[in-house]
Amino acid sequence: MISDEPINQVYDKLKNEAEAAGYRFTPDAAFAKELIRGLLANEARYGYRACPCRLASGNKDDDLDIVCPCDYRDTDLEAYGACYCALYVSDAVARGNQVIHAIPERRLTPEERSQPHAETAATMDRPLPYPVWRCKVCGYLCARGEAPGVCPICKAKKERFERFI
């Protein structure tokens, strides 16, 4: 069982980071702390903070899309006012002006996730001097030799970047 102290510390850290990046945590602190308990349990079990509302495989490379904050957070926030687990919510939800309803699962099946992405660079007239990297969490783009260690927008780690072009 995870004690309340590390949960409270992670809650404060994640909430402050989220708000500094323009995101909102659920106004229900007790609910958020239970989700964080699940994140920490998954971190102890697998070595990474997989969303507690999804089934993790135990293989980090296969689960990078569901490491919190997950790749689906922003699209869920736009469409439904909350991410799948409802840890992150829209301003309207945080203010009590919108009610959260069921959020459908966006995660692809393992077979769908293994399909290669279409290469957009093939349609370009000339090669770029650097590859373009995209943060799969927030969409941040940067052109450089390799992906940044941490996304300057959402603080996702290097492994959450994909080569975009």
Image (tube, grey):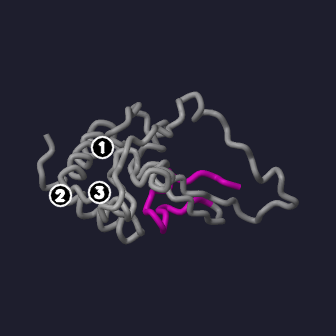
What residue sits right under mark 3 in the picture?
Answer: 26
Which mark is first along the chain, 3 or 2?
2
Give the residue at the far top of this rendering. Answer: 111
What residue sits right under mark 1 in the picture?
Answer: 43
Left or right: residue 76 versus residue 92 is right
- Looking at numbered disc 1 in the image, what kind of residue is underneath it? Glu
Left or right: residue 73 versus residue 97 is right
- Looking at numbered disc 2 in the image, what kind of residue is underneath it? Asn
Report the front residue among 114 and 88. 88
- Boundaries of the magenta span: 146-165
What residue sits right under mark 2 in the picture?
Answer: 8
The nearer-to-camera label among 2 and 3 is: 3
Give the residue at the far bottom of this rendering. Answer: 20
Left or right: residue 47 versus residue 146 is left
Give the residue drawn at x 25%, y 49%: 36
Q: Position of residue 135 (x, y in %)?
A: 54, 57
Q: Which mark is residue 20?
A: none
Q: Real-space Cα distance between discs 1 and 3? A: 21 Å
